Image (tube, helix red, strand yellow):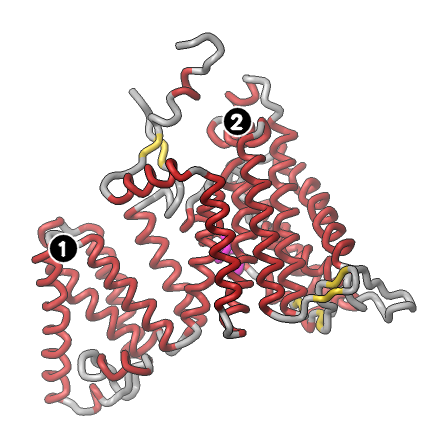
Amino acid sequence: MPIGVDEWAAQSSERRDSGSGWQRRLTVFSERVGWWPRWTLVVLAGLAFGQLSLNVNVQTVAVNCLIYAILAIGLNISVGWAGLLDLGYIAFFGLGAYGYAIFSSHALGTAGAGGVELPAIASIPIAVAGTAIIGALVGLVSLRVSGDYLAIVTLFVGQAFMEFVNNVATSHLGGVNGLFGLAPIHSFGYSIVTPRGYYYFALVACALLVLLMRNLERSRTGLGWRAIREDELAAEAMTVKTKLLKIMAISFGAGVAALAGTIFAAQQDNVFPTNFTANILILIYACLVLGGVGSIWGAVLGGVVVTAGEQMVSSPLDASYLFYGLILVALVAKVRPWRTLAAVLAGIVALGLAAHAIVGAISASAVGGSPGSVGWIGSVVSHWVIVPKDATGYGNVLYILLICLAFALVRVRRRYLPFLLVPTVYIAACCWESRLVVNPSITAQILIGAILIAMMAARPQGLMGTMRVEVV
């Protein structure tokens, strides 16, 4: 080993598990392309999407995807790099949004008579810096507690923020009614008033943030954060300034969350306390976990995939595309050999047709309901799935049965797996058409949870995360 080269650092590439098959080939190709070309291609693809997407709803969804990508990047600092479980992260998102509402609107009064209406070039840095300072104060708590205790304390911070905006500062922050009629992002005589404009603004902010995070990850600060994540006592013994770095991690993450909050508030034209509930925090964590904890690109990809998937669930047709598409992709990816896959697909179709015919012959009302899917998918499955006229209780029973079958799939021996897949997929389809697709708000949470469970079983490190293995 050459003098001055640490053996543990030199063997880092050997401790990374790149997978096998197409995963290894994709990893090798990504490493050969290099980081800067990948960043350039992603930015160019984002710019091209902005030009090609003409639908206003699609542009709005794209803005939300970028906002959640920024939120996932910020959460990755404290959770992914420093290993600090921050459950109050949603409060920083809300502080950025309310900060923008205060400094770039008439929330504190009428302009010229006690009100504050600053251009975005001033209000956004103020909101970001102020939230980062509050994050640093919260980070002081991490010096005395860690692990589960830190999670409990930061969770209290999130709840304290909700209590403050709901009941304490009602005269200035609107309480449960929130603040509305906010000024758009404006500076130097220009204003952003269209979803496409906010998309480009969020794209530029996200691209620059990725560059900043790339440099931060490779700096001594980034290395110190990862050292704390692996072993705080060992890092402190190696003269790493653990106290300062822990405060910096939560503070930097808070600033990034505030940046996302300012874009969110300006694009929505309003802010309400319900925009910053625990459900949103779970969604942000889902973005990071799905993309890969500790990976910058994983955070971006997770934010885009989870947010786009959640938006698709709100439309019955798009939700059905997502549901049946994910099932088909999972079967194609996991069921081998090909003849077994063909047998499973044929068994699912045959079981549905036979069950529908038998149940229909016994009772016409048992198959008298309409599938929740619309369009051609609804027409295709109308004579395949069993949907009674009163499908609420029936769907609840199927949902419980589906959970039991999912546990059985995990425990069953591999050779029996194809036989259990057939009824499981069919019951999932019946439950989807009778109960889930007609309740998009609940279905989004269930679907995201199911995707995360499947991802953790198949690829625990996430889509773009790296699994570390010890070299013995």
> What mark, if any, has residue 108 been given in the picture?
none
Q: Position of residue 270 (x, y in %)?
A: 67, 69
- Quadrant (top left/top right/bottom left/bottom right) for the N terminus: top left
Q: Locate residue 330: give its quadrant.
A: bottom left
Residue 69 in the figure: left or right of residue 467: right
Mark 2 surroundings: few (<14), some (14-19) or many (≥20) residues within 10 A: some
- Quadrant (top left/top right/bottom left/bottom right) for the C terminus: top left
Please give the name of the residue rendered at 37% of the width and 40% of the height, measured from the top-left corner: 30
Residue under pointer 1 = 417
Q: Locate residue 102: give its quadrant.
A: bottom right
Q: Position of residue 58 (x, y in %)?
A: 49, 70
Report the magenta stretch's main SS: helix
Please give the name of the residue rendered at 74% of the width and 68% of the height, measured from the top-left corner: 183
Q: Earlier in the sequence, mark 1 or mark 2?
A: 2
Question: What's under tag 1, amino acid-wise?
Answer: Leu
Q: Is residue 412 above or below residue 163?
A: above
Residue 436 in the figure: left or right of residue 180: left
Residue under pointer 2 = 232
**Does 245 appear in magenta?**
no
Identify the secondary structure beneath mark 1: helix
The residues colored magenta run 280-284
Please give the name of the residue rendered at 12% of the width and 79% of the height, measured from the top-left corner: 353
Identify the secondary structure beneath mark 2: helix
Q: Nearer the viewer, residue 243 or 308?
A: 308
Q: Position of residue 457 (x, y in %)?
A: 29, 48
Q: Position of residue 470 (x, y in %)?
A: 33, 25
Q: Is residue 402 above or below residue 378?
A: above
Please give the name of the residue rendered at 56% of the width and 52% of the height, measured from the top-left corner: 70
Question: What's under tag 2, amino acid-wise?
Answer: Glu
